[in-house]
Amino acid sequence: MTTLDLPPATEAAPAAAAAAVEPPAPEKRIRLGGVTAEDALTLAGALTGSLGLDWMLYERVLPFSGAFGFLLCWYVLFLFGYLAIGRLQWGPLVVRDRLVSVVAWSSGVLVVGLIADQIGFVLARGLEAAEHLNFFTESMDHTAALSPITSGGALNAIVGSLEQLALTTLFAVPLGIAAAVFMSEVGGRMARPVRTLVEAMTALPSIVAGLFILGVVIITFGFEKSGLAASLACTVMTMPIVTRAAEVVIRLVPGTLREASYALGGSQWRTVWNVVLPTARPGLVTAVVLGMARGVGETSPVLLTSGFTSQFNADPFSEHQVSLPLYIWNYVKQPYPEMISRAFAAGLTLMGVVLILFVTARVLGGRRPGRLTRRQVRRIERSARRAAAAAAGTH
């Protein structure tokens, strides 16, 4: 029996083994998102440098003037400055990513600033009239142009707007949802012309809708100017919005629900009525509320179809009836401070109505199609418990 002669161990082997078992270098943690000190300093440096350069160009070099041009030039110089400073410390991909983020954030801040400026301006001009309770409880039938701010109000306009909005919703919602169901569920050769007509009506100027109702309903058929005529004009503007939004929501309903209904023997009508529409209910509510928010702020159709009166008229089917947009249009152009303040207070009230409608749409339409509410979940759980208790009692 032979044995193998092994080579003698060298000193390099233990060193190599020791090197092999050395712990690896600690990994560098990469931070995703957030704002670092470098980002903040780069942003501040670009803002400060661009502001100084903009001031020098506007005040010392170029014959320019005006706040809007100054701010626009400052923003352009800021973007170029941020790009240059960022290129000195980051790679091209990171610089493009940071630049797009800055543009997006600055655009959002600009939009929020414009909205806050509009709300603040209307609030400052209309708070003098809105802080008095008589503005919401009285009309203008016994108030003259030089009457104090404690006399008169916009009760007639508020009631008129709410009644016209209710009639507009009553007319536009069934027609809009029916058209959406036809385009998305029925289809056929007429679906494309109907969709084209709805898209064209979406871009229709509001004054054209008022002229249409004025020429057809008032002049041709002999109806008088009233809240009903104004509601018909607003219906022409509201129905396309409801139709387009409802069609998008109905198309989001999963096709498997329709297939399951057909497999159980349901007809197309029962499938649409019992499956598709209940599943798309939150989105349909959003579409309806958005259409209402569009209709309540229309001025041109109401100006041509409802007439103007300073008296209180709660009957939208006879005589002239004023609304908040028409109230604002009539009083804001008068040269009396009290009238202008009432007009701005009416504008503040109209903004509040639109805000309530949009918040309602956000709350009611925040769920996905088919997602159950808490109340529905509790109802299903109670039904399941009662069924389990009944089954246990039978055994």
Image (cartoon, rainbow, N blue to C red):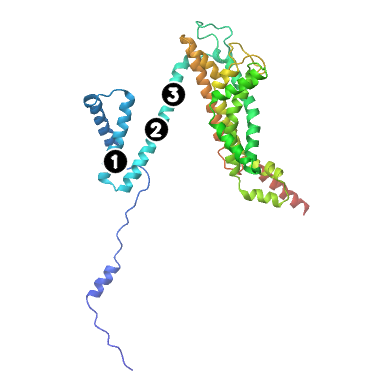
**In front: 48, or 38?**
48
Q: Which residue is mark 2?
A: 109
Question: Do callouts 1 and 3 mark residues in contact (Cβ within 8 Å)?
Answer: no
Distance CA(mark 1)–CA(mark 3): 32 Å
Q: Is residue 376 visible?
A: no
Numbered circles on residues, count: 3
Foreground label between 2 and 1? 1
Q: Is residue 189 visible?
A: yes
Q: Secondary structure at mark 3?
A: helix
Mark toward the start of the polypeptide (1 vs 3) = 1
Q: Secondary structure at mark 2?
A: helix
Mark toward the start of the polypeptide (2 vs 1) = 1
Type of the residue with mark 1: Leu
Type of the residue with mark 3: Gln
Q: Which residue is mark 1?
A: 83
In percent of width and height, residue 355 lies at 52, 27
Q: Residues within 10 Å of mark 1 (few under 14, many from 20)?
A: some
Distance CA(mark 2)–CA(mark 1): 20 Å
Q: Which residue is mark 3?
A: 118
Foreground label between 1 and 3? 1
In percent of width and height, residue 323 lies at 57, 18
* Lateral position of residue 393 relative to residue 144, left or right: right
Q: Residue at x 35, y 44 (%)?
A: 97
**In front: 192, or 121?**
192
Question: If the image is split into quadrants, where does the C terminus sit?
Answer: bottom right
Q: Residue at x 54, y 35 (%)?
A: 362
